[in-house]
Image (cartoon, rainbow, N blue to C red):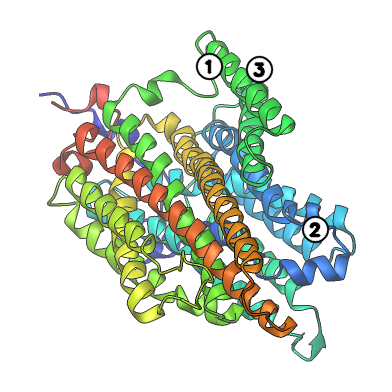
Amino acid sequence: MSDVTTATDAPTGAPKGHSRLGWALVLISVAQLMVVLDGTIVNIALPFIQKDLDIASANLRWVVTGYALAFGSLLLLGGRLGDLFGRRKVFMTGLIIFGIASLLGGLATSEGTLLAARALQGLGAALASPAALALITTTFPAGPLRNRAFAVYAAMSGVGAAVGLLLGGWLTGLDSVFGLSVEGWRLTLLINMPIGIVTALLAPRFLAESESHPGELDLPGAFTGTLGLLGLVYGLSRAGTDGWTDTWTIASLVAGIALLVLFLVTERRMEHPLLPVRVFMNRTRAASFVAMFFAPAAMFAMFFYLSQYIQTVMGFSPIKAGVAFLPFCFGLVAAAGISSNLVNRIDPRYLAGAGTLMAAGALFGFSRLPFDTSFPVSNVQGSYLTDLLPYILLMSFGMGLTFVPLTLTAVHHLRNEDTGIGSGVLNTMQQVGGALGLSLLGTVATQTINSRVDVLQSSAEKAAAAGGPALSQAQQQAAQVVASHQVFTEGATAAFLLAAGLMVIASLVTWIFLNVRHKELATDGPEAVVAV
């Protein structure tokens, strides 16, 4: 039996001792939380941003989409840059760019400046996020310590969206800080600046630098891969708002797919490819990537539709809507902690398989929210304690059990020089999967809503023709509000049902193809040379 597992041990200068490892994990976790929550923190502030900067309704979505586009399209490049130039260096660079962009966005006085700042934030996030995940593998030894670190990282990735909604609701409601008058929406961006800069400055003290391989950057791959992902993510995002038959949606998707095909062809011929094919050669790793494509696609449905349902149908204020998701945060953190301990004794297949089934059950539960299909519709709405909370908790535990083992298996046994790009692939799968999921779910919800509106209009016309009792203007307005709530709920439940199906696909992939043993997760080194 040969033992070459030390070939990928953490580099010289890695933090020693639990205290320094703890601080290293704090820095990585703070960075990941900041990057993830920034995707949702401005959502609740959008009406205030639109008013202050006079942004047209058609352009308002770019405040969110601009960040997602830059983030999703640059992740592969960001991950490879960490492998080539040093992960700590790229991690710090990403955080500094993110902090400066947050400052520019918070001080923006025009639409163009804000959108440019959001795109720059996406660039910073694309550099920092893959490097953060890769730094765990080079800082923490394989086994329980690394598993716990991955659990914290996975928890930050999962709760970030919910924390963003809560923090965004609270900050948007503020009108002053330290006695200084300030628009609350600006604080949703400004809060990132000191956190990002301080985290970057502390990184050299607690995080070790990885080996660098300058001069091996694959420029053709970087060009075609980045533009291909940009086209794909933009097309999927546009499909969710403008439909799958929109000219720009089709053109963007076709261009994105063509460039990605060219990218894959180019990568097979490069001596130092941006995306080495060997990253996908491991069956378990490939299964982890696929499962992490479908699972976030389904999970985003909960945040997107449930946050709207809680506010528009149930009448919760923005801050109360954020608080409504707190149980999800607590449940996911608890489940991630449990999962990090169980993964030392139970194979990842069983943990992630059970977690995805739990999440599928939760999404199916959301699809049962009550709505009225009769005419005229009655004021039916779900109860938070009975119709939402049990499934929010079930979803949180399911995702906690899913994210930790899949994150571990996605980067396990990668070559040391490939951990950055492996992390980039994992993050890209989550982003592209989320964009695809929202587009598919948006299509289903919109079609359901349009169909129901047609039915209600037809029923109303028949009732009027039959000489039904005339309604006052106030009664008509009230009836329209109730009808809009019911129509939205029906569309959302259709989206939740599809999301449950996507989660079942993730579960099937996990049960069938994820075949790594829990004992293997305590070993280091690329699979091809690990002791057998």
Is any part of residue 471 visible from this angle?
Answer: yes
Q: Nearer the viewer, mark 1 or mark 2?
A: 2
| Residue ID for mark 3 | 220
256 is higher (above) or lower (below) than 211: above
Q: Position of residue 84 (x, y in %)?
A: 55, 30
Q: Residue at x 57, y 38 (%)?
A: 75
521 is higher (above) or lower (below) than 168: above
Q: Is residue 378 left or right of residue 38?
A: left
| Residue ID for mark 2 | 57
Q: Residue at x 55, y 63 (%)?
A: 488
**292 or 196, which is in the foreground?**
292
Question: Where the N terminus falls, by quadrant?
Answer: top left
Q: Residue 264, labelled with which disc?
A: 1
Q: Residue 370, labelled with which disc?
A: none
Q: Quadrant of residue 311?
A: bottom right
Q: What secondary structure is found at the residue carrying circle 1?
A: helix
Q: Position of residue 321 (x, y in %)?
A: 53, 76
Q: Nearer the viewer, mark 3 or mark 2?
A: 2
